[in-house]
């Protein structure tokens, strides 16, 4: 490959193959760790289980920088999406939007769509990347993401790329009956709300709203984004439940630490209120530690352990019976998948 006009590996004269990017799990611990691996500070992802006012109000008390929405991508449904896409002259010059040109990159692109359009500490790598791609069109920005080695490595760190079973599975997830899932981002930007979908030609203007949190959720940008999410969900049948919604919010430990510092300066750090704050902070730290444990397990290569286990079962004479039962279970699972479809990412 030859890199153009920079010693940074952002633009290539060749196209990256889809196999260079793994699928990653839609999980707040995964996404928070991924964002932080880009160099971003002071944010975390929080999963939303409901779209009612009470659920949105729980995150509305802290800065909310964007939403990332996962849904089943249906080609026929997308073909009938008549919502207008912002033309280049209608798109704010400083709004970062990139076309998705690489399979399986939609999760990272949705996260970047939030991070690069938010008032957060992005770190040197993403700051340089945004500056470098400022004059690019959306498709060139998409290729730049695909060729940014640090971004790709961070993304792929959440997939066990040395697992031959995963690679073999990826080869078979390409039939017309496979289910495909896709991520899009919703962000507030200069008093408007945009949907950023890398499979579209440009941003979609969802509506007008204030950037900040408001007592009336329906009047805030979250309320505007909620309606767009609900509209998409309603286009599916009542039996479809495969959706996931997360918000990028301020790291919840930040205001607690600030409150504890204020209490210490005021000489009331031994009060019951301060004790409550310390308990909240401890719970958040424990959640972070649990995220780390789960992410380590996701990344771990269990193949050597499995091979040794198979050897032990073969030596004990139990392997034939277990293999027969596993084959029967696999056949039954394959039968159910053939009736309902597989799953893969976009």
Image (cartoon, helix red, strand yellow):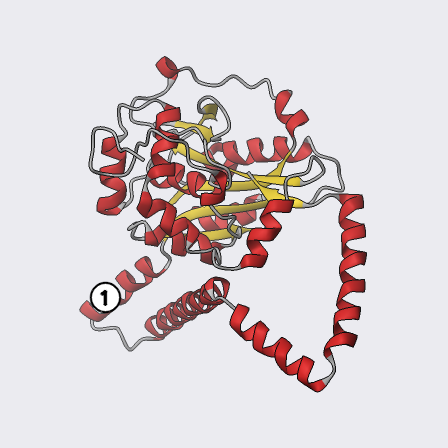
Asked if one can make out residue 159 in the rendered structure from this viewpoint, the answer is yes
The residue lying at 37 percent from left, 58 percent from top is 252
In the image, 334 versus 204, the foreground residue is 334
Residue 190 picture quarter:
top left
Which part of the image, by quadrant, shows the C terminus?
top right
* Left or right, residue 59 beside residue 82: left
Asked if one can make out residue 242 in the rendered structure from this viewpoint, the answer is no
Which residue does the numbered mark 1 point to in the structure image? 261
Residue 87 picture quarter:
top left
Q: Is residue 166 above or below residue 145?
A: below
Residue 281 picture quarter:
bottom left
The residue lying at 45 percent from left, 44 percent from top is 20
Q: Is residue 337 above or below residue 103?
A: below
Q: How far from the left and from the top, in percent, is residue 17?
A: 46, 38
* Left or right, residue 117 beside residue 82: left
In the image, 179 versus 309, the foreground residue is 309
Q: How far from the left and from the top, in percent, is residue 285?
A: 38, 68
| Element type at mark 1 | helix
Q: Is residue 126 above or below residue 165?
A: above
The total number of labels drawn is: 1
Which part of the image, by quadrant, shows the N terminus?
top left
The residue lying at 44 percent from left, 22 percent from top is 202
């Amino acid at each position: 490959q030859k890199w153009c006009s920079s010693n940074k590996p952002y633009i290539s004269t060749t196209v990256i193959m889809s196999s260079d990017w793994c699928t990653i799990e839609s999980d707040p611990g995964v996404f928070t760790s991924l964002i932080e691996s880009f160099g971003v500070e002071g944010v975390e992802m929080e999963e939303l289980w409901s779209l009612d006012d009470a659920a949105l109000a729980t995150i509305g008390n802290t800065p909310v920088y964007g939403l990332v929405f996962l849904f089943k991508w249906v080609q026929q449904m997308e073909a009938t999406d008549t919502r207008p896409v912002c033309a280049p002259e209608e798109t704010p010059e400083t709004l970062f939007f990139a076309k998705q040109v690489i399979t399986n990159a939609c999760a990272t692109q949705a996260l970047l769509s939030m991070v690069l359009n938010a008032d957060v500490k992005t770190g040197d790598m993403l700051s340089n990347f945004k500056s470098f791609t400022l004059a690019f069109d959306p498709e060139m920005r998409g290729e730049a993401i695909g060729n940014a080695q640090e971004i790709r490595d961070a993304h792929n760190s959440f997939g066990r790329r040395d697992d031959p079973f995963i690679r073999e599975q990826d080869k078979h997830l390409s039939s017309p009956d496979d289910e495909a899932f896709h991520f899009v981002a919703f962000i507030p930007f200069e008093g408007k709300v945009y949907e950023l979908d890398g499979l579209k030609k440009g941003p979609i203007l969802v509506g007008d709203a204030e950037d900040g949190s408001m007592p009336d959720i329906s009047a805030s940008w979250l309320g505007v984004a909620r309606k767009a999410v609900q509209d998409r969900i309603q286009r599916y049948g009542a039996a479809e439940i495969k959706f996931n919604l997360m918000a990028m919010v301020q790291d919840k430990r930040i205001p607690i630490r600030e409150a504890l510092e204020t209490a210490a300066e005021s000489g009331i750090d031994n009060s019951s209120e301060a004790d409550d704050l310390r308990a909240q902070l401890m719970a958040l730290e424990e959640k972070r530690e649990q995220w780390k444990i789960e992410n380590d397990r996701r990344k771990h290569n269990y193949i050597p352990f499995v091979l040794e286990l198979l050897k032990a079962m073969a030596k004990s004479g139990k392997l034939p019976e277990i293999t027969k039962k596993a084959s029967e279970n696999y056949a039954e699972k394959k039968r159910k998948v053939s009736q309902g479809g597989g799953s893969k990412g976009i």
